[in-house]
Image (cartoon, rainbow, N blue to C red):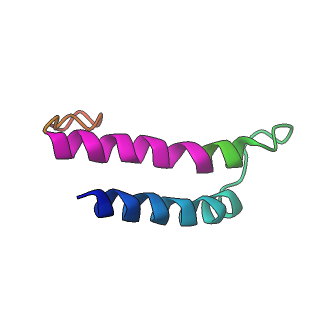
């Protein structure tokens, strides 16, 4: 089970530079928005995965 979480974390770490490169900031003056998005979406995705695995089926989409 722990290897699953290591694998998920490793894949998200690999995705951070890709997302930072792909996503453009809407605000022209804020050049760090794409990096903030790239770092924060894995945190939220891991939280959803953990909640689903431990039995809390609410993933925040309202489609329970």
19 left or right of 26? left
Q: How many marks?
A: 0
9 left or right of 54? right
User: Is residue 49 one of those drawn in magenta?
Assistant: yes
> What's drawn in magenta, residue-wise?
38-54
The C terminus, quarter of image:
top left
49 up-or-down from 30: above or below: below
Q: Which of 62/3 is in front?
A: 3
Q: Position of residue 42 (x, y in %)?
A: 48, 49
11 left or right of 19? left
Residue lying farthest to the right in this orientation: 29
Q: Residue at x 81, y 38 (%)?
A: 30
Q: Which of 12/62 is in front?
A: 12
Q: Quadrant of residue 57?
A: top left
Q: Residue at x 23, y 58 (%)?
A: 1
Q: Could you tell me what secondary structure mostly forms the magenta stretch? A: helix
7 left or right of 32? left
46 up-or-down from 19: above or below: above
31 up-or-down from 12: above or below: above
Q: Position of residue 8 (x, y in %)?
A: 39, 60
Q: Position of residue 33 (x, y in %)?
A: 71, 42
Q: Residue at x 17, y 40 (%)?
A: 54
Q: Which of 20/29 is in front?
A: 20
Q: Position of residue 5 (x, y in %)?
A: 34, 56
User: Is residue 5 one of those drawn in magenta?
Assistant: no
């Amino acid at each position: 089970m722990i290897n699953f979480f290591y694998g998920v974390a490793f894949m998200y770490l690999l995705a951070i530079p890709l997302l930072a490169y792909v996503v453009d900031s809407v605000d022209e003056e804020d050049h760090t928005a794409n990096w903030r998005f790239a770092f924060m979406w894995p945190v939220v995705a891991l939280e959803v995965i953990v909640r689903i695995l431990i039995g809390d089926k609410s993933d925040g989409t309202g489609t329970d």
